[in-house]
Amino acid sequence: MKIAIFTDCYLDLTGGITTNINIEKQELEKRGHTVYVFSSAYPRTKQQIIKLAKENIFPVPSCKHILRGITPVARRPRIIEKWLDQNHSEIKDFDIFYIHYEAGASIAGLRYARQHHIPTVQVMHGREDVGEANLVPLGLRTIVATLLNWFHSWYLPHPAKVHRDNYLATTLASAKMWTLMVNHANYADLIITPSKHFAKKLHHYGVKRQIIPLAHGMPDNLCTKPHRPRVFTPQPSPNPTTPEPTSTHNNSTTPESSALHKHSPLRLIWHSRVSGEKRIMVFLKALRQVTGKYQLDVYGDGNDLKKAKRYAQRHQLNVIFHGVAKFPAIYQQIEKSHLDVLVSYNFDTFGMTLIEAESAGTPVLIADPDLREVAPEGGYILSATPSATSIADAINSLFSHPEKIRQMSEIMLRDRPRITISHKIDQLEQIFIKLRH
């Protein structure tokens, strides 16, 4: 098959959507499919564009000086459509347009497919209502959400209207963001969500198209890599109330501390965005209440990074900020960690962090009951509430019951066949084939 992916979250961005697209593209190509990726992007040299084209990755016309949070913004969909006609008319003969996200490049993909009678699959990845609330100052949220709806409705019809309620659309701004998401989804031929709980929320707010929950996957070689179960033996602390010094440099070097050593601090890893919607500050506040020895390694960037560094320094938390790193380096740290951390609440619809941890046999800490759908029962710790105190209580329980780490790790390792990318792509191919007919 010939598959065109359109996305506004890929080039110049790290995160779950980018990781998911990369893994799927590699597996689809391995099976003989042709896969193009069209993405918004920051300006590139002619040589860089040629290099990307060799991998069938194409930056679409994008704004030079406007960005959405930390991501580049595509130009108007009609400009992109004209550019496609001029530069990539071959995609008119493609079998499937596979759309990720809901901004300019994604809108152009949906419209272009409709014009040329090509089936579309839209992946609804995330909670844009929560994302907008975290990126935009309080006084501007309704204005920004209104403008985004206005822009979106220029190109895709908006027959569905979401009104304020006591469920998820609790503000006018969030209701408008749900309006955008619902109408975007309804323009596609079929919807994929990474989780059942998000599918239910989309149905609740008016998505009429068929929705197929299809969990993300990890490369098969990572899911079959031999691992011993993680073992945690708490390191005695003469004064547990005295925190260890913080390191905030990006290229820190520390002695390796394997989870299999006789004594070690509790090794924690954070490799999600360092941002408000991921609740990095809540987790740092929880660490102030942790009574045993720990070390937290933070990978990534985000709008709360500077604040997090200042907070960790001020309170002398044992946190090392590594900055942005390539996944192989992050994965090596996941393999050494006792516990992987994802403490977002009412935001993540899946959380690639959780299956990245599972592929290495690393237990996870979550604060959102919805995310129990992603990790296997017994492979995670769920805090009693999303508060910093409850998160700290969940961590502190491990110092009293360190055997839980091994038990959770064993469950994670046994469950890995479920999360292989080959398992997901088997199902995705069947979806594509049915749509073509």
Image: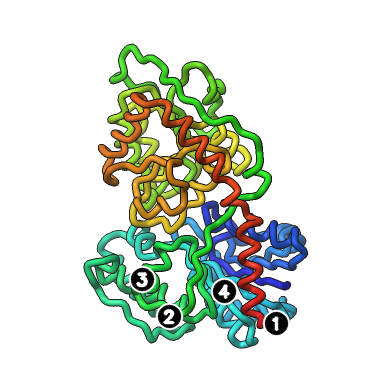
Give whichever of discs 2 and 4 has the lower sequence position: 4
Give whichever of discs 4 and 1 has the lower sequence position: 1
What's the residue at 31%, 19% (across, down)?
240
Q: How is the image coloured?
A: rainbow
What's the residue at 61%, 61% (across, down)?
43
Give whichever of discs 1 and 2 has the lower sequence position: 1
Query: Judging from the image, what secondary structure is the residue with disc 4 in?
Result: strand
Q: Callout 2 environment at 10 Å: few (<14), some (14 to 19), or many (20+)?
A: some
Residue 92's label in the rendered image is: 1
237, above or below 316, in the image? above
Q: Specify whether 218 is left or right of 322.
A: right
92, above or below 195, in the image? below
Callout in the foreground (4, 1): 4
Q: Callout 4 environment at 10 Å: few (<14), some (14 to 19), or many (20+)?
A: many
Callout in the foreground (2, 3): 2
Which residue of the protein is positioned furthest toward the left in this rendering? 166
Q: Are marks 3 and 1 in contact (CB under 8 Å)?
A: no
Residue 121's label in the rendered image is: 4
